[in-house]
Each structure stands twice: as structure tokens, then as C-alpha cells.
Amino acid sequence: MATKIRLQRGGRKGYAFYRIVIADVRAPRDGRFTEKIGTYNPNTNPSTVDIDFDRALYWVETGAQPTDTVRNILKREGVYLMKHLRAGVKKGAFDEAAAQAKFDAWKADKEKGLELIREKEANSKKEAYAKNLEAEKKTNESIAKKVADKKAALAAEKAASEAAEASAETPAEEAPAEA
């Protein structure tokens, strides 16, 4: 039986979520599968992969053929690197401890790169938030200035009308007093 490592779609419309499964080559994409070895969520930045590393390595070493996307995921997770290192151990190029040390160093470097991506994303969100807040403050200041100008104009108009009324009332009262 020829086996394939492929993605099985899940999630809702517009928000795909995949299971990484081992399936027969003849099985449909979302049909029967032999084993589920992980999940893949492309909606996060960077995309989230949760995989059973040992089972994935076992299936790759047994000869299961991954699809292109799954091959890229497995390479990014280090399954193919570990397969390569194990082949070196079998040939006698280095021992198991050296292979594990190389893999751990690679994994640490990979995690550092992912952390930088997460920090950059968080910083860009903070900057966008600060920029939007500043723009909103400027808008609020201009609105407050317009409101203050309008209130000042209304107060000046009211004072002018009161002054006009006061001046109109004053000559009428003074005229009988002079007579």
C-alpha cells in the first residue's frame, strides 16, 4: 500500500485549519486516513504547526511521500534534517550525540528567528496603535477647537444682543426723566 502524508482540511469557510495525516494514495483529501500526526494553522503569523515529531520521522523514514506543502512544513519543523542526521549516524560520519547536538543548535536558531518575527509583529501593532491614537487625538482637538469657536461666537452674539437691548432700553428710560 502506497502511503502519502497530506493535509486534511477542517475549519470554517474563509478560516482553513488542517490536520496532517497519513493516508492511502487512493483516498480522497478529506476521506479515510491511517493516522493523524499533527495540525497546521496557516491563519496565524507565523503559521502554527503542532506535530508528533517521532511519528512524522518514522513515516518519512518508512517511505511515505509527503505532498509539497507537507514537505515544506516537515522541513521547517526539522523532520528532514533529523532524517539526514540519522543517515549520517548510520554511515558512521558522526555519533548520535553529535547528531542531536547539531539538531538542537538548529532548533534553537529556528526558535530565535520565530521570536524575532513575533516581536516585529508586536512592535508593528504597537506602532499602528500609537499612530491611530495620535490621529484620533488630533481629530478630537480640532473638533474641540471648532466647538469652542462656535460657543465663543454664540457668547459674543448673545453679549452683543444683550448690549443692544440694554442700549435700547436706556434711552427710553432717560427720555422721561429729562422732561
Image (cartoon, rainbow, N blue to C red):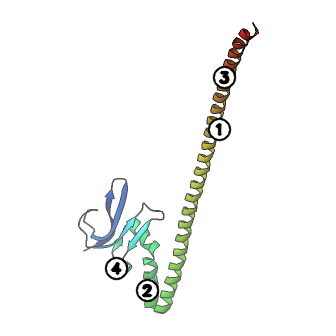
Q: Which residue is mark 4?
A: 55
Up-down relation of residue 48 to residue 169 (above or below): below
Residue displayed at 42% across by 62% down: 42
Q: Extreme left residue here?
A: 32
Q: Residues within 10 Å of mark 4 (few under 14, many from 20)?
A: some
Mark whose residue sits in front, 4 or 3:
3
Mark whose residue sits in front, 3 or 2:
3
Element at label 4:
helix
Q: Which residue is mark 3?
A: 162
Mark whose residue sits in front, 4 or 2:
4
- 140 on left or right of 62: right
- Nearer to us in this view, 133 or 41: 133
Which label's residue is closer to the chain start, 4 or 2?
4
Residue 17 position, x and y percent, is 36, 62
Mark 1 touches mark 3? (CB < 8 Å): no
Whole-number angstrom distance, CA of label 3 to CA of label 2: 96 Å
Mark 3 touches mark 2? (CB < 8 Å): no
Residue displayed at 24% across by 64% down: 31
Whole-number angstrom distance, CA of label 4 to CA of label 2: 15 Å
The three-letter amino acid code for the residue at tag 1 is Lys
Residue 144 position, x and y percent, is 62, 40
Residue displayed at 71% across by 9% down: 176
Whole-number angstrom distance, CA of label 1 to CA of label 3: 25 Å
Q: In the rendered view of the protein, which quadrant contains the N terminus?
A: bottom left
Q: Is residue 92 visible?
A: no
Q: Which residue is mark 2?
A: 86
- 109 on left or right of 3: right
Q: Which residue is mark 1?
A: 145
Quadrant housing residue 38: bottom left
